[in-house]
């Protein structure tokens, strides 16, 4: 998702700076916890992998405009389940920034909005994963129903934030609501595909168990909580 230029402008865009600052602060908390638990080398390696993955998701995977934003296959659930919350947050922020700096400078004024839209649902996804995945279950053993719930939570959070920014910037006009509806409907395709992609990646990780060094993945991938 990338909020289209002009959806929020003028003095209103200041709110995005505040929300992005809050998201960044919470990301710093996750990063510190991961750093203490896993060390700088593991965190750096997983963060670099996440950043490269997000950049690929934005630039190489199919994406298209729909209503007030763009539809992307972000695979945020995959990032969280394989690499952990802190690297996922760093990767989303880093990949988004690189995409803007290198290919879409027109998106940079919307960076705060886009960052908030990506990260806050990720925090919710992290909380939900801890709630719905029973202790004793490694991520590689998740069912389709569980991954669908996680993906729906993340994608639903993205759609909700895009809707908020559109209404905040443009009001409750019929055109704005129609654009939001078009974006939400287009995102249904992501919700269909992402759980399948999640399971495919988890299956690959399961097949590599014992070969994939644990510093390169989140501990919960193979080990029950």
Image (spheres, rainbow, N blue to C red):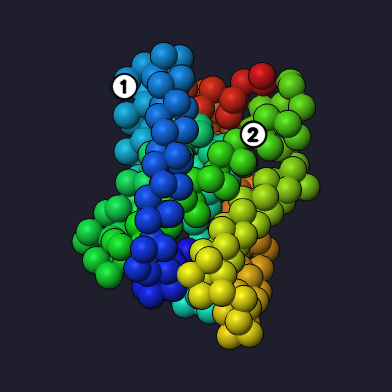
Q: Could one spot residue 55 in this view of the protein?
A: no
Q: Residue at x 53, y 66 (%)?
A: 168
- Mark-to-mark CA distance, 2 and 1: 25 Å
Give the side of residue 212 with respect to residue 160, left or right.
left
Point out residue 189 in the picture as x, y percentages from the top left corner.
63, 69
Where 54 sits versus 49, above or below?
A: below
- Nearest the viewer among 134 and 138 is 134
Q: Which residue is mark 1?
A: 41
Q: Could one spot residue 101 in this view of the protein?
A: yes
For label 2, the crowd category at 10 Å Cα-Cα, with few meaning under 14, some 14 to 19 and many 20 or more, is few
Where 161 sits versus 147, above or below?
A: below
Q: Which residue is mark 2?
A: 127
- Nearest the viewer among 198 and 94 is 94
For the C terminus, which image quadrant?
top right
Point out residue 74 in the picture as x, y percentages from the top left corner.
49, 56
- Nearest the viewer among 96 and 222 is 96
Residue 57 bears which disc, if any? Answer: none
Q: Residue at x 67, y 46 (%)?
A: 150
Point out residue 92 in the picture as x, y percentages from the top left corner.
41, 47
Give the side of residue 177 with respect to residue 52, left or right.
right
Point out residue 66 in the picture as x, y percentages from the top left corner.
52, 78
Secondary element type, mark 2 = helix
Identify the image quadrant of residue 181. bottom right
Give the side of residue 208 with respect to residue 5, left or right.
right
Q: Residue at x 53, y 79 (%)?
A: 67
Q: Earlier in the sequence, mark 2 or mark 1?
A: 1
Whether label 2 touches label 1, CB < 8 Å: no
Query: Residue lying furthest left in this view?
Result: 102
Query: Residue lying furthest bottom in this view?
Result: 175
Secondary element type, mark 1 = helix
- Nearest the viewer among 27 and 50 is 27
């Amino acid at each position: 998702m990338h909020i289209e230029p002009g959806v929020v402008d003028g003095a209103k865009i200041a709110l995005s700076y505040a929300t992005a600052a809050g998201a960044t602060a919470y990301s710093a908390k996750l990063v510190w916890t991961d750093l203490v638990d896993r060390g700088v080398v593991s965190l750096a390696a997983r963060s670099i992998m996440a950043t490269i993955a997000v950049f690929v998701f934005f630039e190489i995977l199919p994406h298209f405009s729909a209503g007030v934003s763009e539809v992307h296959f972000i695979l945020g659930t995959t990032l969280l389940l394989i690499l952990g919350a802190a690297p996922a947050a760093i990767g989303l922020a880093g990949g988004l920034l690189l995409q803007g700096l290198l290919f879409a400078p027109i998106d940079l004024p919307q960076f705060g909005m886009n960052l908030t839209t990506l990260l806050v649902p990720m925090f919710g996804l992290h909380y939900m994963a801890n709630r719905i995945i029973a202790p004793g279950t490694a991520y590689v053993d998740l069912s389709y129903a569980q991954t669908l719930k996680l993906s729906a939570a993340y994608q639903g959070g993205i759609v909700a934030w895009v809707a908020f920014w559109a209404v905040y910037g443009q009001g409750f006009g019929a055109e704005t609501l129609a654009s939001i509806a078009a974006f939400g409907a287009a995102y249904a395709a992501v919700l269909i595909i992402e759980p399948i992609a999640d399971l495919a990646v988890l299956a690959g990780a399961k097949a590599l168990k014992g070969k994939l060094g644990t510093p390169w993945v989140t501990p919960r991938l193979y080990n029950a909580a």
